[in-house]
Image (cartoon, rainbow, N blue to C red):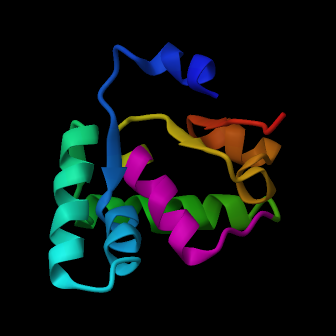
């Protein structure tokens, strides 16, 4: 997997704020959440805020995908929309939800397949 991700080494590495929230939620104290925030900020170039642009992209992508018979869980759609709104590539291990031809035709998504 590390070798696969090296193709993105010269690009900005981001994570959506909604993913950051999931990391914070896994902690049992505010101090733990703040440590996790520091760790995320040191490992990513930027944490992408949820914005009106993200909401717009999510609505657009949902409509386009549904017209092709593809649905995504809301949180996955929001993660994908954050990358799409920023013009980035969404990289994921989630083959079940994201390895679908209509999705690949619509957005830049890289599904890392487990060995």
Q: Give the quarter of the figure containing the C terminus.
A: top right
Q: Main secondary structure of the magenta part?
A: helix
Residue 81 place in picture, x, y as percent: 45, 56
* The one of 55 and 19 positioned closer to us in this rendering: 19
Q: Is residue 77 left or right of residue 73?
A: left
- Residue 77 belongs to magenta span: yes
Q: Which residue occupies 62% across, 21% down?
A: 4
Q: Is residue 100 left or right of residue 90?
A: right
Q: Which residue occupies 32% across, 42% down?
A: 14
Residue extent of the magenta highlight: 70-83
Q: Is residue 18 left or right of residue 108?
A: left
* The one of 55 and 14 positioned closer to us in this rendering: 14
Q: Is residue 6 left or right of residue 109?
A: left
Query: In the figure, residue 50 lies in which quadrant?
Result: bottom left
Q: Which residue occupies 64% across, 74% down?
A: 73
Residue 99 place in picture, x, y as percent: 77, 46
Residue 104 vertical position relative to residue 29 in the rendered view, above or below = above
Residue 22 vertical position relative to residue 104 in the rendered view, above or below = below
Query: In the figure, residue 112 lies in which quadrant?
Result: top right
Can residue 45 be seen from the camera position used here?
Answer: yes
Q: Give the quarter of the figure containing the N terminus.
A: top right
Residue 53 place in picture, x, y as percent: 28, 59
Residue 89 place in picture, x, y as percent: 48, 34
Q: Which residue occupies 69% across, 60% down?
A: 65
Can residue 86 be seen from the camera position used here?
Answer: no
């Amino acid at each position: 997997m590390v070798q696969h991700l090296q193709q993105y080494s010269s690009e900005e590495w981001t994570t959506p704020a909604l993913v950051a929230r999931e990391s914070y939620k896994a902690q049992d104290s505010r101090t733990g959440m703040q440590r996790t925030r520091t760790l995320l900020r040191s490992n990513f170039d930027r944490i992408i805020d949820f914005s009106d642009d993200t909401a717009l992209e999510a609505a657009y992508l949902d409509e386009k995908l549904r017209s092709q018979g593809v649905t995504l869980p809301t949180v996955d759609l929001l993660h994908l929309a954050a990358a799409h709104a920023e013009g980035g590539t969404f990289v994921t291990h989630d083959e079940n939800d994201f390895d679908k031809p209509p999705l690949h035709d619509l957005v830049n998504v890289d599904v890392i397949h487990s060995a």
